[in-house]
Image (cartoon, grey):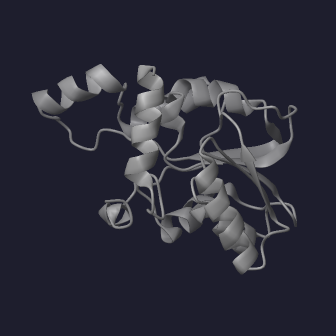
Amino acid sequence: MTDNASLSRAFFALHHGLPRQGPGSDDTTRRLLSFVGALPERPRVLDLGCGPGRSALLLAAEAGAEVTAVDLHEPFLDELRAAADARGLGGSITPVNADMGELPYADGSFDVVWAESSAYSIGFDTALRSWRRLLAPGGALVLTECEWTAAEPSAAARAFWERHYRLRTGEENVRAATRAGYAVLGAHPQPESDWDEYY
């Protein structure tokens, strides 16, 4: 078994039964949606790394979205299908087992590309580059990203992140998005309460 396969199995086992696979909340999802502005009556939303679909369900119910919900872990997609059917949203959500780094969709296919706590799996800069082509004219990319919140992180924290993932400040992430060609409409630091449903 490869290290990647072992890591994937550990990730899915660790997150089994949780409503989310990263920090977040319905309030934060709504707040992020408010940055997008006016949408078509039935916006086409691509939810990447959807997990069991907490955001997908909210976007379908409250924004009237037709959601394509992508995840690699079929059990998460099974949970989403069941939840969507139970809420009468089965016709608005299409769960898809796919790799968010190798998406089969044509350019301009979506009004919104949504990625809460998932861009890290392919890297923030890669996500910015790869997903832009999927947006229809006037479309929006909405994502959350881990970032430094302390002005002077400890040496131990810096050493950990330098080994595992390039962590930046919120301002640095905004600059990266601007360099990638996006007009940043807003940034919303997640409140501590967003950890309540995630360990």
On screen, residue 126 versus residue 113, left or right, reads: left
Q: Position of residue 49 (x, y in %)?
A: 59, 45
Q: Quadrant of residue 166?
A: top left
- Residue 9, by quadrant, is top left
Q: In which quadrant will I find the C terminus?
A: bottom left
Q: Residue 54 location, x and y as percent?
A: 58, 64
Task: Note whether 106 is above or below 3 in the view shown.
Answer: below
Q: Which image quarter is the N terminus in?
A: top left
Report whether residue 59 is seen.
no
Going by the image, does 53 lie left or right of 14?
Answer: right
Can residue 183 be seen at all in this image of the molecule? yes
Compared to 50, does 92 lie above or below?
below
Q: Residue furthest left?
A: 155
Residue 8 lies, with reference to residue 54, above or below; the image says above
- The residue closer to the viewer here, 177 or 8, is 8
Judge whether 61 appears above or below 142 on screen: below
Residue at x-position 82% and y-position 66%:
92
Q: Name the residue located 48 percent from the left edge and 65 percent from the top edge.
A: 19
Q: Position of residue 151 (x, y in %)?
A: 20, 38
In the image, what residue occupies the spot 45% across and 63% down?
A: 17
From the top left corner, tell me how far across and down residue 35 is, in percent: 62, 57
